[in-house]
Image (cartoon, rainbow, N blue to C red):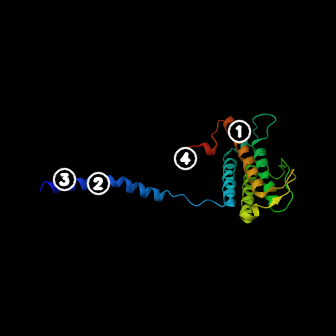
């Protein structure tokens, strides 16, 4: 008779020992990664990510500080947004087979208010994203002559402008910090 409680206790202990292994198996199934993005989907994801950050800054920064610049030779906050956003058309225009529509620093004739600049930033990001979707993997592999020493693939042009936009995002963070503000991306997420 004494063997039954001992056997039951051993079986119970064995079941308890297996539970963490089963739980781990179940967690492994939940954490399976999604399939890799296609090359054009990866470009689009990064394009939209930096675009989202720039749009958030454009919408968040106070309009009365759009004329702020950290040094006399620097661009104003508003001019910096115009420069980085308009440069995105360097990709979009070449992808559409056109010459670039904006110089390095676009004129601010029709882009003077915060609302106008925010709308411009949103449009530049959206137009580039639309072109990336339209081109897809095959189209982004096309070579274009952007005036450099060799032809560039549209992929490379897009990634170059994503990097350029990221560099200017970093510079715009300084505008925030110099004004005692925290950039949207650096705020705690509740």
Q: Residue at x 76, y 37 (%)?
A: 69
Badge 2: few (under 14), some or many (20 or more) residues near its Cα, within 10 Å? few
Please indicate whether residue 13 sits to the left or right of residue 186 in the image: left
Q: Which mark is residue 14?
A: 2
Q: Which residue is mark 4?
A: 189
Q: Residue at x 63, y 60 (%)?
A: 37
Q: Alpha carbon of mark 3 to alpha carbon of mark 2: how far?
A: 12 Å
Q: Residue at x 72, y 50 (%)?
A: 162
- Mark sitting earlier along the chain (3/4): 3
Q: Look at the picture and state if 178 lies above or below 96.
A: above
Q: Which residue is mark 1?
A: 175
Q: Alpha carbon of mark 2 to alpha carbon of mark 4: how far?
A: 43 Å
- Mark sitting earlier along the chain (3/2): 3
Badge 3: few (under 14), some or many (20 or more) residues near its Cα, within 10 Å? few
Q: Quadrant of the N terminus?
A: bottom left
Where in the figure is residue 102, as x and y percent of width and height? 84, 53
Quarter where residue 93 is shown: bottom right
Q: Which residue is mark 3?
A: 6
């Amino acid at each position: 008779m004494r063997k039954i409680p001992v056997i039951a206790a051993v079986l119970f202990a064995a079941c308890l020992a297996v539970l963490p292994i089963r739980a781990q198996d179940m967690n492994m199934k939940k954490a399976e990664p999604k399939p890799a993005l296609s090359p054009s989907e990866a470009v689009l994801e990064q394009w939209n990510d930096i675009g989202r950050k720039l749009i958030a800054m454009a919408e968040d920064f106070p309009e009365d500080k759009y004329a702020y610049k950290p040094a006399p030779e620097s661009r104003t906050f508003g001019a910096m947004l115009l420069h980085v956003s308009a440069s995105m058309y360097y990709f979009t225009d070449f992808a559409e087979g056109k010459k670039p529509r904006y110089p390095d620093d676009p004129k601010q004739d029709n882009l003077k208010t915060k609302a106008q600049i925010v709308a411009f930033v949103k449009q530049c990001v959206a137009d580039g994203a639309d072109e990336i979707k339209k081109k897809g993997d095959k189209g982004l592999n096309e070579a274009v002559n952007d005036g450099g020493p060799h032809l560039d693939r549209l992929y490379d042009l897009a990634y170059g402008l994503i990097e350029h936009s990221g560099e200017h995002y970093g510079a715009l963070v300084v505008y925030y910090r110099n004004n005692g503000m925290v950039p949207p991306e650096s705020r705690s997420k509740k």
